[in-house]
Amino acid sequence: MSLEMTSELESKYHSKLKGDSLMILGMLALLIGVETFVIGKVLSATWEISSGFSYLYIVFVGLVVGIEAIGCLRVRDSIRNHMFEFRYYD
C-alpha cells in the first residue's frame, strides 16, 4: 500500500473511532440516567424504611457506575488497539 493510501486509511479509522467513542459515551450516559431514575423511584417509595441506611444506596450506585465506566473504557481501548489488526471499519 502506498503512503498516501495508508494515511487516508488511518484518517478514516480515527474518524470512525471518534464516532464509536461518542456512541460508547452516549451508552454510558443512558445507563447512568436510567439507573439514577430507578434508584430515585426506589428511594422515594421506601424513604421511611430506608432513610437510616440510604448511604448504602449511594455506595451501590457509585460501584455500579464505576464498574460500567471501567467496562466502557475497556471496550473503547480494545477497539482502538485492534482496529487496524482486524480491519474493523472496512
Image: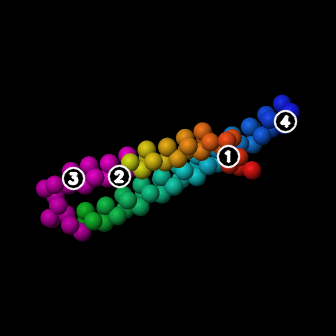
Seen in the image, is 11 located left or right of residue 78?
right
Q: CA distance from mark 2 to mark 3?
A: 12 Å
Q: Secondary structure at mark 4?
A: loop
Residue extending furthest toward the bottom: 45
| Mark 2: amino acid | Val
Question: What secondary structure is the magenta-colored segment mainly?
Answer: helix
Would you name the residue on which mark 3 appears? 56
Instruction: Please indicate, yes or no, whether residue 16 appears anywhere in the rendered image.
Output: no
Q: Secondary structure at mark 3?
A: helix
What residue is rendered at 31% in x and 53% in y? 61
* Front in this rendered view, residue 65 or 55: 65
Q: CA distance from mark 4 to mark 2?
A: 45 Å
| Mark 3: amino acid | Leu
- Residue 50 falls inside the magenta stretch: yes
| Residue 86's disc number | 1
| Mark 4: amino acid | Met
Q: CA distance from mark 4 to mark 3?
A: 57 Å
Q: Secondary structure at mark 2?
A: helix
